[in-house]
Image: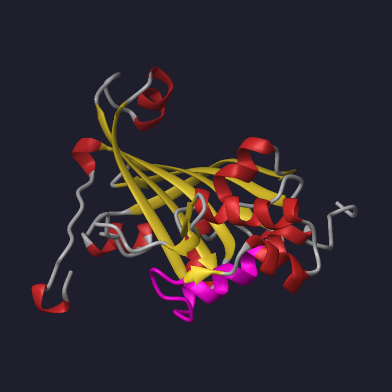
């Protein structure tokens, strides 16, 4: 694919610049971000471009925009990240179970509107779209549906995911700086139930994960587990204020 875009849109450059200041701690929670007019002067761009960058940050929950007051770095919420990023194969083998995985589909695309919104990139950004099924002791353990941002992880284009699962490969190759987990309880659709070898409408655990590297989106993945084959454990220390 030779016609991939080489230059990021201006608003994404601005958004990533502001994200770096937030993620590095330079701008702590409550920090007031420069006004749109100040940002326009600083970056030499239109108000529409600045507004688009700020809107993207607000949509991701990193900032809060208030009419007539301005934009502020958002404070952490009570929805703490309760999961580390684990290697699925390592988890299965740690529990004494055999492991294998099957790549169901692999496609390289330019992000459409929905994909761009999900992973947090500009439309037409090159993405690798992967679907694979992980097994433990011969039973489906988790369905993985993943987007990888090829503008950040170009090496994924040539990675042999028939040998190494994409999650394991990313953990070994790409140092992520920030991650977000969302956890949902859902009922299996007929298609999902067939894939995971479970009863239709039975309970599933759905983990939606996004990772970034210095403010740039790396991957978005949806991991769907049969509810009776997976559990979450989080350990907290009140002395650490968590």
Q: Find residue 200 and report its image quarter.
A: top left
Q: Is residue 214 visible?
A: no
Q: Residue furthest front?
A: 68
**Which quadrant would the C terminus be assigned to in this image?**
bottom left
Q: Is residue 96 above or below residue 199?
A: below
Q: Is residue 94 magenta?
A: no
Q: Nearer the viewer, residue 38 or 92?
A: 38
**Does residue 40 appear left or right of residue 130 in this picture?**
right
**Does residue 55 appear left or right of residue 50 in this picture?**
left
Which residues, given as a range, are shown in magenta? 15-31
Expressed as whole percent of the image width and height from the top left, the position of residue 43 reads 76, 70
Q: Residue at x 76, y 46 (%)?
A: 124
Q: Is residue 224 above or below residue 45?
A: above
Expressed as whole percent of the image width and height from the top left, the position of residue 204 reads 28, 34
Q: Find residue 138 and report its image quarter.
A: top left
Q: Nearer the viewer, residue 140 or 110?
A: 110
Expressed as whole percent of the image width and height from the top left, the position of residue 207 reads 35, 46
Q: Is residue 88 visible?
A: yes
Q: Residue at x 32, y 63 (%)?
A: 76
Q: Is residue 24 magenta?
A: yes
Q: Nearer the viewer, residue 31 or 216?
A: 31
Q: Residue at x 9, y 73 (%)?
A: 238
**Does residue 242 appear left or right of residue 40 in this picture?**
left
Expressed as whole percent of the image width and height from the top left, the position of residue 86 reads 35, 63
Q: Residue furthest right?
A: 2
Q: Nearer the viewer, residue 115 or 30?
A: 30
């Amino acid at each position: 694919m030779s016609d991939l875009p080489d230059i990021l849109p201006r608003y994404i450059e601005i958004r990533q610049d502001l994200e770096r200041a937030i993620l590095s701690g330079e701008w702590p929670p409550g920090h007031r971000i420069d006004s749109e007019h100040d940002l326009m002067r600083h970056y030499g761009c239109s108000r529409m471009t600045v507004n688009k960058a700020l809107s993207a940050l607000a949509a991701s929950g990193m900032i809060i925009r208030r009419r007539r007051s301005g934009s502020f770095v958002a404070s952490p919420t009570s929805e703490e990240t309760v999961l580390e990023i684990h290697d699925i194969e390592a988890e299965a083998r740690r529990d004494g179970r055999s492991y294998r995985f099957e790549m169901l589909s692999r496609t390289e695309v330019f992000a459409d509107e929905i994909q761009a919104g999900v992973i947090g990139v500009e439309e037409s950004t090159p993405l690798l779209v992967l679907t694979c099924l992980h097994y433990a002791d011969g039973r489906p353990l988790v369905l993985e549906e993943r987007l990888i941002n090829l503008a950040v992880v170009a090496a994924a284009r040539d990675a042999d995911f028939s040998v190494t699962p994409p999650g394991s490969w990313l953990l070994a190759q790409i140092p992520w700086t920030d991650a977000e987990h969302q956890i949902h309880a859902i009922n299996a659709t007929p298609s999902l139930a067939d894939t995971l070898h479970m009863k239709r409408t039975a309970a599933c655990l759905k983990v939606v994960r996004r990772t970034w590297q210095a403010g740039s989106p790396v991957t978005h993945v949806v991991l769907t587990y049969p509810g009776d084959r997976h559990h979450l454990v989080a350990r907290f220390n009140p002395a650490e204020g968590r």
